[in-house]
Image: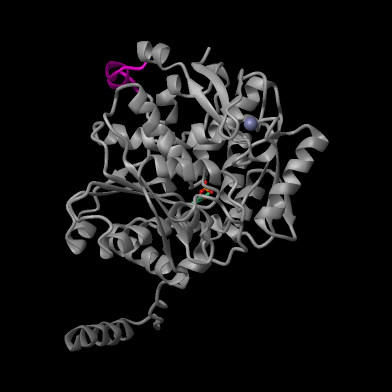
Amino acid sequence: MGHVKRLKCLVCGTEYDENEVMYTCPKCGDNGLLEVEYDYESIKREFTKEYLSNNKSYSLWRYLPLLPINDPSKIAPLQVGFTPLYQVPRIREDLGVSNLFVKDDGRNPTASLKDRASAIVVSKAQELGKTEITCASTGNAASSLAGATASLGLKSYIFVPKNAPKAKLTQLLVFGATVFAVNGTYDEAFDLSIKATREFGWYNRNTGFNPYTVEGKKTVALEIAEQLSFDVPNYVFVSVGDGNIISGVYKGFFDLLNLGFIDRMPKIVAVQAEGCSPVVDAVNGDGIIKPVVPNTIADSISVGIPRSGIMAVKYIKNSNGFGIKVSDEEILKAIKYLGTMSGIFAEPAASTSFAGYLKALKEGLIKGSDKVVVIITGNGLKDIDSAMKSVKEPIYIDPTIEDVKRKVMEINELFRRR
Ligand SMILES: *Cc1c(COP(=O)(O)O)cnc(C)c1O
Ligand SMILES: [Zn+2]
């Protein structure tokens, strides 16, 4: 058996046994997000530094004692997690900073951090004997769920806005999901998927509804901590849509603090697009989430009603972090900068965190000597139309060496004149 002690409503504080509720607090309805609480004393007996150094599993299952899994024989086979944490030397030099790290979570099997949540949810579905799983998504939660269900032969029913980037839709279809392309927004797709869950009895993976997505996403923080030898960063920068990933980042460090692996929490920084910033506005304002009509190129964070917003705001404030907004132009520039200076290719929602880092540095909100981790949440190949907006055209040539020579001379001439 796993080490989950209980589920506790973030709003009214009611405690439930893990077998008693499946999604949100019945008393509070959709707002009643449940926090998963663990029996840290029993985890401590199993999960030690020695346990980690003897552990040959380089995936999120490395942290099994800290996950809400009761039957390890039911876990999903795709290799999720243990993504690289880079020191990005060229960026450090260019910016004059000494302690920057970039965690590339685009390196997951379906190319986004969402794989961490889907791995847990499908494993949970297997434990519950559910064979049909649904979710609403801006794209990545869906493609990760479809990949995870494909690995186990489960069925997935997906609700995405019909204008989701083509690569994400293609992933869904290739992984064999049943795809409902909704003539509406993500927020509408979300409500629809909840209705379908009630109608058909499917298991629901939705962000800010299923309490276990945060538990999967927290593994990114567990990895960051371990990769830094448990020397906690000062700041972690996270792109925010629903606020589920950032809640997971907090939860991972919170678990490690309770287990005595780290001695303090990092400050967690939320980054959103100027055209869709309900969480950042709440963090920097009165703490209350006010829904907006989203308007940003970063589709994965184009969320007008942040479903984990209450949790995110609470955790960011607890960590003494802050929120920062960036423009779509800054988001696109960050794709190019990160790509050119590190070889990491981020989708717009993923470069948003990096754009926020650059802005915070420039505005003096953080220091060049601060130890900072920026999480890249999804791969740039997910949305090449946006990426193309951040770069120039290639050099078109005839298939002759003369033409190549001419073009190289032109380039050199341009450099000389600069
Ligand atoms: C989902 C997602 C986010 C935002 O995560 P939330 O939990 O919705 O805040 C950021 N970047 C990428 C690439 C995503 O897929
Ligand atoms: Zn409640």
Using the image as rendered, state which of residue 276 and residue 405 is in the foreground.
Answer: 276
Q: In this view, which residue lies farthest toward the front?
A: 286
Using the image as rendered, state which of residue 27 and residue 143 is in the foreground.
Answer: 27
Percent x, y for residue 155?
71, 35
Question: In the rendered view, does 102 fall on the left or right side of 204?
Answer: left
Whether the magenta-drawn stretch holds residue 350 is answered as: no
Quarter of image, res 128: top right
Percent x, y for residue 313?
48, 45
Q: Is residue 4 visible?
A: yes
Using the image as rendered, state which of residue 118 and residue 189 is in the foreground.
Answer: 189
Residue at x 59% of width, y 42% of height? 207
Region of the chain picked out in magenta, as a range:
47-56
* Above or below for 407 versus 343: below
Whether the magenta-drawn stretch holds residue 49 is answered as: yes
Residue at x 26% of width, y 31% of height? 230
Q: Which color scheme does this rendered protein use?
A: one colour
